[in-house]
Image (spheres, rainbow, N blue to C red):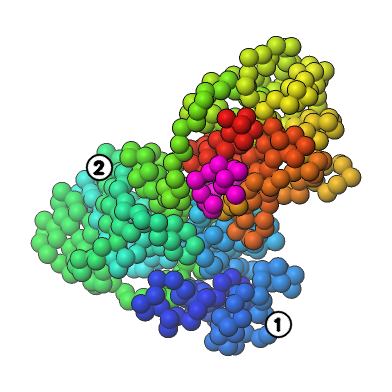
Amino acid sequence: MKTVAIIGCGKPPENKPGHKVGWGVGYSHANGYKIAFPDVKLLAVDPNAENLAAFGDKYSISSDCRFSSTEALYASQIPDAVSVCTWPALHVPMALEAIRKGVKAITVEKPLGLDGFQIQELIDTAKHRGARVAVAHQRRYEPWYAKAKEIIEQGTLGEKLVIEARVGDDWDILSWTTHWFDMANYLFDRAPVSVLAGVDHQGQRRYGHAVENASVIMADYGTTRQALFVTGPAAIPLFGVAVRGEKGMLHIGNPILLWSKQGYSEIPVDKVNFQSAFALLFADLWRSIDGPPSRCDISNCAPATLMAYAAHESARTDRRVSLPLSTWFAPLEVMQNPSVPPTTPVLNVAVVADPHHVWAGFEMSGREGLVDAVSKLGHRVKLIDATKELSPDALSGMDLLVLYHTQRKTSPSHRAVIGQWFEQSKPVVVSHCGIGAYADWPEYRRWIGRYWVWGGENLPPSGHPHVPCKVFVDDPARFAVDWREAYLPTDEMYQGLAEASPTRTLATALDVHGSKQIYAWQVIDHPNVVAWLPGHRRDMFAISTVVDGLRAAIVLATGR
């Protein structure tokens, strides 16, 4: 390893005492690299000039190796390795950027990502590109945990085991307890099969995302092993992690305290400082480039963050949640949004849709999510396959047409049936991918106002990055939602839409990179046509923000 970039230097570590936000973990990463690779050349990236200067001075980094952005870094050089030490919203985007730039080894601070979809995207991209990604669960390299794992595997405590771990001082699951989740997975050498949790959440945020105030979590690892985690209240100052079995018990620390059939013993282990554990992580990651995955490889450590979202989903649904996760959003963010009120009167709604597509080996099923949402709003739904011809009476008796598909070619039957509906000024809601439909039909584009630009046209093609964002409504009186600002988890966020006729903006979305896009509009010349774009996956329609917007679009299009 010759060069490594610390992305997100942060404040110097002397600011840590008494602070829950802003400590520069990048310093620990830098120290770890220096221990593991004494001749390594450090590069520094931070948009805060003061933090960048302090970090650069600390490690004698020359001015041409200090960068205010990753764009400037990669324009200058491609480092051998990077550590992503930013706030969590940028963990996955910056790791993906590093992979695509050709960086060989990437370490990402925890929590790994802000929802399950982000994490899966990073796992898949790293595998496809052949990159090695590690998560900063460096405690796997601290010797007392390795010794505890050895004691467990020797059967000293028996086979029926329970891990108990506590985090106090008003910390939260994502910021701290993910370390203990990962440690339980390391000690048991597996991820749990289910999580059951209760949390106290009152709208607090840390590092820019939702956090809870306290929680109690039970993870089930199978028939003979469980783990209990308590987060938030002041910790009982006996131990951080303990393991109990039918044959004994141990408290993990230095020394390890062991009670067994042979009696009580104190087992000393080699002392290692915080930075040395990082050094072992980085050395192991670098070795893994030409060998098997490292101890902290994303395949081993991603489950710890996913357990956090399983815990939040358990609290949201009041149910035990099985792993792997089937919901891909951040449940605690969803819990901070208001519930969706019922819609009246009952409408007959025709949903013309296709499956859209499959991603990462699972069916997105946005179509089914849309149908579920419209039905839960109290309406009667008729699902029409957009890939087939339409009968002349396909929309007979319908009060509303919802379009959700990307069939680019129009057949005579579609032009006749759909065209007549628009020409009669009947209500239409364009949902998500409906803006990409009927690309060969100019009149349709004028009716819906804004549209997806497919490749090969005179305009630059539209884009759709998968990102979390904030959705803003300036005038809830017109676009009838119960919020002005709401969280929307990782979903397609359309960029570069073309405008075929004038529209009135109803809602905008701001992504984690500061990019602002229109997410809902009403067509001025055809006020019966309203677009509401979120909802790529089925699980998105479990989120009140998405269903709120869909309900508001239906009310505005129909006038009732």
Q: Local crowd at mark 2 within 10 Å, few (<14), some, or many (≥20)? A: few
Question: Which span of residues is magenta-colored?
Answer: 475-492
Q: Amino acid at mark 2?
A: Thr
Q: Residue at x 79, y 31 (%)?
A: 444
Q: Residue at x 23, y 71 (%)?
A: 255
Where residue 40 sits in the image (x, y, percent)?
59, 78
Q: Choose between 231 and 560: the one closer to the eye.
A: 560
Q: Is residue 140 visible?
A: no
SS under mark 1: helix
Q: Residue at x 67, y 38 (%)?
A: 531
Q: Choose between 485 and 266: the one closer to the eye.
A: 485
Q: Amino acid at mark 1?
A: Asp
Where residue 503 sits in the image (x, y, percent)?
74, 43
Where residue 476 sits in the image (x, y, percent)?
56, 47
Residue 49 is left or right of residue 257, and the answer is: right
Q: Residue 407 sits in which quadrant?
A: top right
Q: Is residue 72 visible?
A: yes
Vertical position of residue 429 compared to residue 265: above or below: above
The residue pinned by badge 2 equals 224
SS under mark 2: loop
Q: Residue at x 62, y 84 (%)?
A: 61
Rendered-image quadrant of the N terminus:
bottom right
Rendered-image quadrant of the C terminus:
top right
Q: Any magenta on residue 376?
A: no
Vertical position of residue 333 compared to residue 207: above or below: above
Where residue 303 sits in the image (x, y, percent)?
43, 50
Question: Which residue lies most toward the right here?
Answer: 458
The residue pinned by badge 1 equals 64
Are the two marked residues, 1 and 2, in contact with CB atoms closer than 8 angstroms? no
